[in-house]
Image (cartoon, grey):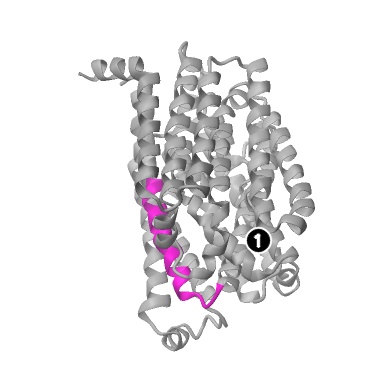
């Protein structure tokens, strides 16, 4: 099987593992916006998962990507496996136990209105952290079906419990049945559903733990930490770039507007599905082909088609924004913030391109650049939000995200071409980005709700792409025949 076909196969399976849970999450966004009393409650739910994202990065400290790198480069695979798993497990215990014992002091500092919610978060983090290396092992061994099954099962349990707690049982019945979980809001039941789903998944993965030795090779660990610590810093900066606006808006504006913004931001879930599917398949694939002669040409080809498909997804969502908004957001108070949709989708597309470009510093063992770019993005995000949000509100937050991801994409490309020259079709990619940006704003602000015109715009993009890439498309079709 060719390297490109192998990539497509793995990306398809991993895409299912990403698409099906995300598809369920689309349903859950609708469920939450329908059953939670108001946008303020939705904001509580959002902040919970923002803190979860920060803690996840801290607890894994870049070890997932580091595991991929060393498992492919080191001869003693079992030593890499045992060292990675043991280090992650020990760090999780060392951090989470003190955080749990100090819950009453720390929870208010992080903005948790209920200490119980904070403790629930710690339980979720424990289960999820302990399964990071087992899941990475499944991916690096190309056991994509096993990986997909566990992921889909996890989100299925989570969704089923959400339906049970929020819809099938009345609030009184839920409180009666869950008397041992004395939360005072419906959001608490969402967090409990997550805890139970993570716990069940941990139990299913547990047989894999029997194959892992709790043993650390200190020499190897030092090498892995040296490679991985910039990824940790980059991860924290990434979470800041992606999520700090959700924490900042309630402080400068109010919980109601912040909740509406967070709800509309969820329309980016369709781009997130695409980017996640790509990343899950691409990361191990990029490492696997890094030493092959045609590696850089493959990277360039994949980036071009990633951008083409991503641009089409952006324009599709913008063209039918009211349909997607009604699908996800069940109450009109969320629609106030719909104007951020084109900006956020385009920002996410540039983030996806940036992730694609990151192959150069991973392959050259210069992960420090990933840290530099992400930290720069984090600093720009913090400054931008503090300066812009008080003046322009939630629209300012969206534009900050757009500008930050655009800067990171451009800087990574510039340095990548200096250190790891790759034959990217830059002119085509830039032209496509400018074209789809113009069409997106034209569609949203001039032709919103006009289905025929927007469908024509979409079809025009397909025609232009076919004309520009007809030689490549014909070549691929003839090879498949």
Split into 4 quadrants, where in the image is the C terminus?
Answer: top left
Q: In the rendered image, which quarter is residue 376 located in?
A: top right
* Residue at figure coordinates x 67%, y 55% from the top left: 245
Query: Residue 224: where, in percent of width, then height?
Result: 64, 34
Would residue 30 be counted in the magenta stretch?
A: yes
Q: Which residues are magenta?
A: 17-38
Please, is residue 440 above or below residue 197 in the view? above
In the rendered picture of this protein, how many numbered marks are placed on residues?
1
Crowding at label 1, few (<14), some or many (≥20) Cα neighbours within 10 Å? some
* Residue at figure coordinates x 43%, y 54% from the top left: 206
SS class, disc 1:
helix
Principal SS element in the magenta part? Answer: helix
Q: Foreground: 339 or 65?
A: 339
Residue 369 visible in the current orientation: yes
Please, is residue 288 above or below residue 393 in the view? above
Query: Residue 408: where, in percent of width, then height?
Result: 66, 34
Query: Residue 92: where, in percent of width, then height?
Result: 62, 54
In the shown orientation, is residue 160 left or right of residue 124?
A: left
Q: List the residue tagged with mark 1.
A: 96
Q: In the rendered image, which quarter is residue 35 located in?
A: bottom left
Would residue 228 be counted in the magenta stretch?
A: no
* Residue at figure coordinates x 49%, y 26% from the top left: 303
Split into 4 quadrants, where in the image is the N terminus?
Answer: top left
Q: What residue occupies the far left of the structure in this picture?
A: 481
Q: In the rendered image, which quarter is residue 327 located in?
A: bottom left
């Amino acid at each position: 099987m060719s390297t490109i076909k192998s990539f497509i196969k793995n990306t398809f399976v991993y895409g299912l593992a990403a698409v099906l849970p995300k598809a369920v999450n689309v349903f859950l966004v609708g469920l939450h916006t329908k059953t939670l009393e108001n946008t303020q409650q939705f904001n509580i739910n959002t902040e919970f998962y923002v803190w979860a994202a920060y803690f996840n990065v801290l607890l894994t400290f870049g070890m997932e990507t580091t595991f991929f790198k060393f498992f492919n480069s080191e001869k003693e695979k079992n030593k890499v496996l045992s060292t990675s798993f043991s280090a992650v497990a020990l760090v999780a215990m060392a951090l989470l136990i003190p955080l749990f014992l100090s819950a009453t002091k720390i929870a208010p500092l992080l903005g948790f209105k209920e200490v119980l919610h904070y403790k629930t978060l710690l339980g979720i983090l424990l289960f999820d952290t302990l399964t990071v290396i087992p899941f990475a092992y499944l991916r690096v061994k190309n056991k994509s079906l096993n990986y997909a099954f566990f992921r889909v099962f996890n989100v299925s349990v989570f969704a089923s419990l959400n339906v049970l707690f929020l819809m099938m049982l009345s609030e009184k019945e839920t409180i009666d049945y869950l008397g041992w979980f004395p939360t005072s809001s419906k959001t608490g039941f969402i967090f409990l559903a997550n805890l139970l789903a993570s716990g069940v998944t941990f139990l299913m993965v547990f047989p894999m733990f029997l194959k892992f030795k709790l043993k650390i090779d200190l020499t190897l660990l030092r090498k892995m930490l040296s490679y991985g610590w910039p990824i940790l810093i980059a991860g924290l900066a990434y979470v800041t770039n992606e999520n700090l606006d959700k924490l900042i808006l309630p402080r400068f504006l109010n919980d109601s507007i912040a909740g509406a913004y967070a709800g509309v931001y969820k329309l980016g879930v369709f781009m997130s599905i695409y980017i996640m599917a790509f990343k899950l398949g691409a990361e191990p694939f990029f490492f696997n082909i890094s030493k092959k002669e045609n590696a850089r040409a493959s990277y360039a080809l994949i980036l071009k088609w990633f951008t083409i498909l991503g641009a089409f997804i952006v324009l599709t969502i913008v063209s039918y924004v009211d349909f997607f908004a009604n699908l996800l957001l069940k109450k009109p108070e969320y629609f106030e913030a719909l104007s951020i949709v084109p900006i956020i989708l385009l920002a996410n597309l540039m983030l996806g391109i940036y992730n694609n470009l990151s192959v150069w510093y991973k392959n050259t063992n210069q992960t420090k650049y990933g840290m530099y770019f992400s930290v720069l993005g984090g600093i720009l995000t913090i400054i931008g939000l503090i300066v812009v949000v008080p003046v322009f509100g939630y629209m300012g937050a969206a534009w900050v995200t757009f500008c930050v991801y655009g800067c990171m994409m451009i800087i990574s490309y510039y340095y990548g071409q200096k250190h790891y020259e790759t034959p990217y079709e830059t002119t085509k990619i830039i032209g496509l980005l400018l074209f789809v940006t113009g069409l997106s704003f034209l569609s949203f602000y001039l032709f919103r709700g006009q289905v025929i015109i927007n469908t024509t715009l979409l079809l025009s993009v397909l025609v232009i792409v076919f004309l520009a890439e007809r030689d490549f498309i014909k070549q691929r079709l003839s090879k498949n025949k």
